[in-house]
Image: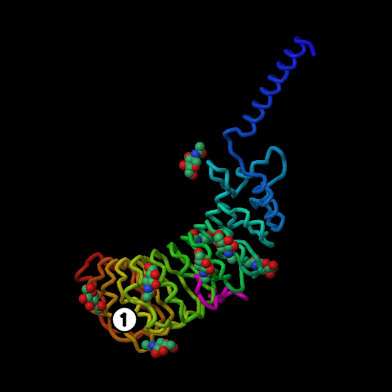
Amino acid sequence: MTVANMVEARCCFKLLYAIVVVLLLHTSSPCIGCSERDRQALLALKQGLVGDDGNCLLSWGREAQNKDCCQWDGVYCNNQTGHVVKLDLGEQSLRGKISPELVQFQHLEYLDLSFNNFSGSKIPDFIGSLSNLIYLNLSQANFGGQIPNQLGNLTHLQYLDLSFYEDNFIPPVNSIHAKNLNWLPNLSGLKHLDLSYTTLSDVGWLEAVNMLPKLTNLILQGCNLPPPIISSVSLMNSSDSLVRVDLSLNSLNSSIFQWLSGTHTNLVYLDLSMNYFRGSSIPASFGNMSSLAHLRLYYSELEGGIPNSFAKLCRLRELDLRSNSLSGQLSDLCLKHCPNALK
Ligand SMILES: *[C@@H]1O[C@H](CO)[C@@H](O)[C@H](O)[C@H]1NC(C)=O
Ligand SMILES: *[C@@H]1O[C@H](CO)[C@@H](O)[C@H](O)[C@H]1NC(C)=O
Ligand SMILES: *[C@@H]1O[C@H](CO)[C@@H](O)[C@H](O)[C@H]1NC(C)=O
Ligand SMILES: *[C@@H]1O[C@H](CO)[C@@H](O)[C@H](O)[C@H]1NC(C)=O
Ligand SMILES: *[C@@H]1O[C@H](CO)[C@@H](O)[C@H](O)[C@H]1NC(C)=O
Ligand SMILES: *[C@@H]1O[C@H](CO)[C@@H](O)[C@H](O)[C@H]1NC(C)=O
Ligand SMILES: *[C@@H]1O[C@H](CO)[C@@H](O)[C@H](O)[C@H]1NC(C)=O
Ligand SMILES: *[C@@H]1O[C@H](CO)[C@@H](O)[C@H](O)[C@H]1NC(C)=O
């Protein structure tokens, strides 16, 4: 090899090196997209689902110009890492099957599949592997069967919504049910729990709920809840954090009043309508719920008068006592002390 040749070769090498560097810089450009694995997992998810015209999965594609799945409708990535952190697939009229490829998204914090139709199929166990979930919404999605215990694995969860509201109060066939709620205390960061119109016949339901120190919203409407075992519930433990409690349309009896006579000073909304309180009167301890703005107790077979302690409920704006056997004057009580109440 001549010297001239060597110089030429070196030049060539330098040029090649420069091209490689430019290419590398280009492919790892600051615009972080999703990984190929995430993209494949989303395409697998799409494969299992069908929807009506206009659903967001239509924008999920293979084309080169549509390669970055962080840009796809309903898909959100962390802009530092490129990991998929949010899947917002609510109200897309989706039907079909949820691919187990979903567990690929180990960084997922937010999953919304509400308002779709999964035809009464069971909530997939593998959702329990998405251990970083903070928000899980499977409401109105026509899931059925037993709630998987694996949900107990979702220890970061703050919002859990499995509700299914029907206009006529008839639960869907094969509605979601749970034999026990032993998995629930594992979700110790839970703030919002809505299991309305699922079937929860476990007498230990209150014990499980009571172990959630951060719970603010407890919504268990129409769940067939039986009277809980109160003796096993630490009344002093009963969440100070609760702001909204809806236990309407269940099979509770007045034993629930014992729990509510705990320290519920932050409670703003309480609905116990349509339960079986026959022969009981409204407990005086309700007058201690100093933040209460809405109290609903209709259709509950309550008897007796309205406790004097209600005079202390100065924030009360709604009091619904229809269809009970109550006597006494409301105006004497509340309005005298708090002219703004119940306007
Ligand atoms: C990255 O995400 C954070 C939080 O979602 C957001 O506040 C920020 O503006 C984003 N940065 C860029 C460059 O998009
Ligand atoms: C859900 O899909 C099933 C068939 O898989 C159908 O029978 C049912 O009517 C659908 N429900 C709604 C609310 O669209
Ligand atoms: C529970 O989470 C752990 C750790 O994230 C995971 O290894 C395990 O597979 C999960 N179990 C279930 C049943 O989802
Ligand atoms: C779940 O989704 C439904 C329907 O989109 C919505 O009404 C509900 O507020 C959501 N639940 C939570 C906890 O955000
Ligand atoms: C509760 O969480 C722990 C660890 O996070 C796990 O080992 C256990 O299986 C969970 N229990 C239930 C009932 O899910
Ligand atoms: C009281 O709540 C804490 C969590 O805040 C829980 O660890 C404890 O077991 C509960 N005690 C009873 C008796 O329920
Ligand atoms: C409530 O129901 C439970 C279980 O059926 C029963 O043991 C208890 O005596 C009832 N309490 C009242 C006040 O009716
Ligand atoms: C209301 O609270 C006060 C002070 O905490 C307490 O002394 C009283 O017994 C309570 N009243 C009822 C009816 O529970």
User: Whole-percent x and y of residue 259?
Assistant: 35, 77
Left or right: where 8 falls relative to 138: right
Residue 282: percent from left, percent from top: 31, 81
**Residue most extreme to the left:** 337
- In the rendered image, is residue 124 in sight? yes
Is residue 308 within the magenta segment? no
Give the position of the N terminus as an image quadrant.
top right
Q: Is residue 334 left or right of residue 60?
A: left
Q: If the image is split into quadrants, where does the C terminus sit?
A: bottom left
Ligand 3's image quarter is bottom right
Mark 1 within 8 Å of ligand 8, using the beta carbon: no
Percent from the top left, x then y, of residue 329? Answer: 25, 79
Please state the extent of the stretch shown in magenta in the rendering: 168-183
Identity, as a three-letter code, of the amino acid under mark 1 = Ile
Residue 124, given in percent of the width and then of the height, sits at 62, 65
Tell me the element at label 1: loop
